Image (cartoon, coloured by chain):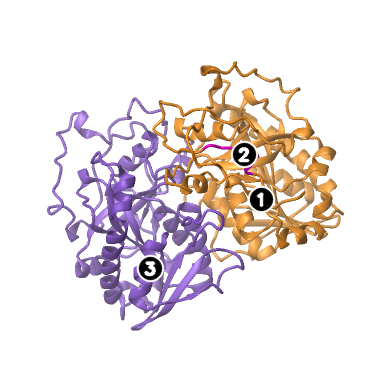
Chain colours: A orange, B purple
Amino acid sequence: MLGLCTPVHEYSLQEPAFDWMPETRNSPPRRRQSCKLYGNSSQFGRLETTRPQSLIPSLSLSLSLSLSLSEAMAIHESKAIEQAQSRPISTIVFIVAMKAEAAPIVDRFGLSEDTARFPEGVPWVRYHGIYKDLEVNVIWPGQDPLLGVNNVGTISAALVTYASVTELKPDLIINAGTAGGFGSKGACVGDVFLVSHIAFNHRRIPLPSFDVYGIGLRQAFSTPLLLKEVNLKVGKLSTGDSFDMSPEDEALVRAIDATLIDMEGAAVAYVADLLKVPAIFVKAVTNIVDAGNPSLEEFHANLADVSATLNQAVGRLVDKINGKRMSEL
Amino acid sequence: MLGLCTPVHEYSLQEPAFDWMPETRNSPPRRRQSCKLYGNSSQFGRLETTRPQSLIPSLSLSLSLSLSLSEAMAIHESKAIEQAQSRPISTIVFIVAMKAEAAPIVDRFGLSEDTARFPEGVPWVRYHGIYKDLEVNVIWPGQDPLLGVNNVGTISAALVTYASVTELKPDLIINAGTAGGFGSKGACVGDVFLVSHIAFNHRRIPLPSFDVYGIGLRQAFSTPLLLKEVNLKVGKLSTGDSFDMSPEDEALVRAIDATLIDMEGAAVAYVADLLKVPAIFVKAVTNIVDAGNPSLEEFHANLADVSATLNQAVGRLVDKINGKRMSEL
C-alpha cells in the first residue's frame, strides 16, 4: 500500500514516555550493530514496535508522548494517493540544501540554471533539464546574500519546497543530501539511506496534541520495489535547525529511534504532506554523531566525497524511477 | 532613516562572545526595572551597545559570536526601501499564528473569510476587508487537519508570509501575537510591545558565518512616529520553535538582550527581508518566563484577555497607519 508523506499523529498521549537509553534501565544493553549487518531492504517500512518505558529524569523536557508507532500507522487512503499511484512519473524535483551536494547531481544530468520561476530577488536556484523520459529539477535554496553561506535549515527547505511544488507541480519530490548518522544504529560514513520516517527534534510544545504536532512524525512515500532495485540502507531521520544536538534535541532523536539527523528533511516532509505530493528522502552519511569524533571536522572532511557517493545513488534511483508510475516504485 | 526588515549580519566573529549574566561578572548587578519605568518610546530603535565579554562555561554551545550591534547597524539603502518610503499604504497583511489571537482582530475590522488565494487543501485562512483607506488582511495558518491544533511555529509562519506576499503584495506586514516576556527586562502580563529587533534562538550552527546566519538577527521596519502616537513599549524579540527554553535556547535569547520570546517572529522577519516587504511586530505578553511561575498555566489563563489587549493596540496602530505613507510612520 502506498502513501504520501503520511503524518503519524495518533500516538497515545500518556506517560510513561521516552526511554532512549535502555542500557541504563532494566533492559539489556543494545548491541552495536556492524554496518554490514544493518539495513537490509526488508527493513524498509518496518516499524519500531518497542514501547518506550520511562522519562529521562534529568531532562527538563516535559513532553508526555508515548510513541506507540505500531498503533499509529493507519495510512490515509485519499483520492490524491490513488491519483499518485496511477500517474506516470514525468516531473521530479530534488530539494538539495547545499551547493556541494547539488553540484554533482546537476552535472550528472546536464541541467541548466533558471531562476525565472521564483520571485525576483530570492536566492533560490532551479537547475532543470530532460533526462530520459523525465523532467529533472534540482532546487537549491542558494546562499545568504550578505553572508555567502548556503541557506540550510528548515525554513528555507520549507519555502523552496512550497515554491517548487506550486510552480513546477512535480509528481515526486526527492530530498537528497548529507546527514549525520548514529554508529550505534548501524550508520557508517559513506552509507546512503532511503528514509522510512522523518520527525523534528527541536520543536517542543508540551501541550496536548501540540506536542505531537511539534514532533511532526511522518512516513516517507513507500517505495519497496525501488528500494530492492537500488539496495540502499533504511533508517529513520530526525531533523533540527542546529548542527549540534542539545540534550533536549537528542531526546526527540532517540524517541523515534532515528539513525540519521539532518537539518531539512522534516520540513520538506511537512510541505509535501501539506500539498499532497509524494516525497522520498535520500541521505548520505558524512559524520558519525555518537562516535566521539568532532562532527564538524568529520563533516568537512567528508562532504565532497560523500556528496559524490550520494550522487551515484541518486543516479541509480533516477534510472529506476524513469518510465515507471508511482505505484510501481 | 527607514529600513526594511534589515538583517544585522556584520558581527565580529571572535571570542569572547556571550555574557548574558553580567551580574555574575565584573559589572554591577542589573536592577530589576519596574514595569512602569521601562519601555518609553525613546527606546525604540536604540541599540544595546554593551559588548558581551565572555562565554558561559557551562554551555556546550560553541558559537563564537560577538554581538557588536553598534557596529552592525549599517542599513541597506536599496531601491526597494526608497519605494517603500514613498508609497501610500493601501494593503496590510497581519500574520497571526493562533485563532484566539486572530479572532478579535477579524471582528474589529469586520473581515470576511476567503481561502481562495492559497493552494487547494492547505489549512491557511485569509480574512479580509476594507477599513477606512486600507485593505486589511489577517492571515491565520489554520489548524493541523488531524490534530486540530493551531499551526504555530516558524515553518507555518514562513510559509503563510511567503504565500501572502506573493499573492497579496502588501505594503506592510504586521506580525501580531502573544509572547512570553522577561520580567527582569521590564515585561508585565498584558504589556504590548513594538519590536525593535528579532532573532532565532534555536538555530545553532557553529561554523563561520553559518552561526550568524542561524541566529538571523534582523531589525524591524523602523516606525518612530507611529510608536510615539500609540505609546507602546519597545523590546527585542527572540523566536524559537519550542514553547519552553533549553539552556542553549536561553543563551541565544540573552545574547540579543531579548525582552520577549515567541514562536514565529524571526521567521516572518526572514521572509519579509527575503521578499523586501517592510514588517513590524506587535507582541502582547501572556506570561512571564523568568518569574518562576509555570509559563503554560499563565499562558492559558491569560491568552483570551491578552489577545483582547493586543486587539486594542492593533486598532490604535491601524488607525494611525491609515492615510499615511511608509515614510510617515
What's the magenta region?
A66-72
In the picture provided, is B225 more to the left or to the right than B151? left
User: Is label 1 on the same chain as label 2?
Assistant: yes
Quadrant hosting residue B322:
bottom left
> Quick one: A113 or B91, which is closer to the camera?
B91
Q: Dot 3: within a 10 Å radius of its alpha carbon, few (fewer than 14), some, or many (20 or more) residues?
A: some
Kind of residue at disc 1: Cys
In three-dimensional space, the C-alpha distance between marks 2 and 3, rounded to whole angstroms, equals 36 Å
Q: Are marks 1 and 3 in contact (CB under 8 Å)?
A: no
In the picture provided, is A178 more to the left or to the right than B102? right
Identify the residue under disc 1. A5
* Residue A45 screen position, x and y as percent: 72, 39
In three-dimensional space, the C-alpha distance between marks 1 and 3, rounded to whole angstroms, equals 32 Å
Kind of residue at disc 3: Ala
Identified at 58% across, 51% down, the residue is A157
Identify the residue under disc 2. A69
* Residue B16 screen position, x and y as percent: 33, 31
Kind of residue at disc 2: Leu
